[in-house]
Amino acid sequence: MTETALLARRKKLLGAATLFYEQPAHIVRGDGVFLYDDKGKEYIDLYNNVPCVGHANPHVVAAMQEQMSTLNVHSRYLHEGILDYAERLLDLHSANFDNVVFACSGTEASEIALLMARYATGGRGIICTDSTYHGNSAEVRKMSRVSLSGSPIDEDYRAIPFPQSYQSVAGHLQGEALTDYYLAKVQAAIDDFAENNIPLAGLFVCSIFANEGLPDIPPGFMEKAAAMVKKAGGVVIADEVQAGFCRSGHWWGYQTSGFVPDIVTMGKPMGNGLPISAVAASAELVSAFRDNTRYFNTFSSSPLQAATGMAVLDVIDNENLLERSAEVGAYLRAELKRIQSQSEVMGDVRGCGLFIGVEWVSDRESKTADRAGAVRVANRLKDKGFLLSNAGALGNVIKIRPPLVFKKEHADLFLTAFDEMLGEL
């Protein structure tokens, strides 16, 4: 089937669903960091964090196959597998997490976290950022809608400007003064809830503000913002769906950003492609949630999820992917910063671990965002065999987020192509 015919068939059956690139890639196979299209062209994947231990990882595939050939049922029977997985997952987290609630998607995890925060505190008010994304359900989408509108779309939500150092709305403030500026926005949201007699439930943020563009967070902001929210009677929810599982160079993004949340949500990379997500919190918070909701999910807490999740953790440990994320990520950032010194369109290079953002600008001095330029970069690199995309609040951040099995040799191939692309542009 031709690409034109395939596009027409897709639109007829799926509607106008989003696709990447001006000429969409027709991907038929994956292996490690590589993807292959229908014509056999090889791409290096620099975008997908779902297959965090690599596309078609043989250890994960074998674990899935063995478990499916043995047993897979819902969670209303006893099964050791999910308990072993829960213990192993909790051991990777801060000591204040005692229980796990499993689900199937990041959206479901976000819903659980919202309910957990509200039952635990008796509050309703949620503070989020003005460019956030935590999922697609009617309730979770309210956080994104607050962000897009710039004003409360629902009385239970307030948006704050996301903390950043590069394109800051605070003008030329730096250091502690910049931190204080953003902390004042958090306090203003807390005060606004109080003035409107809306009890505070908590703060809900991605621990590294990935959807916002992976900004350099002003020093101490997250630790102090978390303390402010807790003092006001709320809890702090860290979305680890993008940030977690060694992506940031630590196991969790909250470790990178320097704070301890009350609730964490996890998703995407947990199953390397199998739908699995989770929420971790203290026994007290989880009990309040369980008692009030009697939550049940047909496909969660399953033997299949447990076996697959354990296999992913095996690969991360056995192949030292935490160390690789930190080391290869640092190398790639350093090389991109070297290239940046010779390129006026690269306004900023930032990130943590194997998650890098390159801010594309039309003028470095004024920091004018260039979304169209970022789109061109993604398309040019796709043609050269490297898949990434543009993202961020202004759509002008080149988002580099390869599977954790990405090596220095892959980084070097990308850097050569990146340099060539700059010359062509």
Image (cartoon, rainbow, N blue to C red):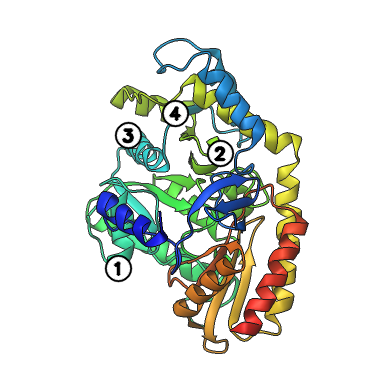
Query: What's the CA distance linking mark 4 and mark 3?
Result: 15 Å
- What residue appears at the point 71 percent right and 82 percent down from the top-left corner? 341
Query: Which mark sits nearer the N-terminus, 4 or 3?
Result: 4
Query: Which mark sits nearer the N-terminus, 4 or 1?
Result: 4
In the rendered view, would you say 100 is above or below 259? above
Q: Which residue is mark 4?
A: 101
Looking at numbered disc 3 in the image, what kind of residue is underneath it? Tyr
In the rendered view, would you say 224 is above or below 55? below
Residue 97 left/right relative to 91:
left
Looking at numbered disc 2 in the image, what kind of residue is underneath it? Asn
Q: Which residue is mark 1?
A: 150
Q: Classify the position of the C terminus by image quarter.
A: bottom right
Looking at numbered disc 1 in the image, what kind of residue is underneath it? Gly
Q: Residues within 10 Å of mark 4 (few under 14, many from 20)?
A: many
Residue 119: mark in rendering: 3
Q: Which residue is mark 2?
A: 272
Q: Residues within 10 Å of mark 3 (few under 14, many from 20)?
A: many
Q: Nearer the viewer, mark 2 or mark 4?
A: 2
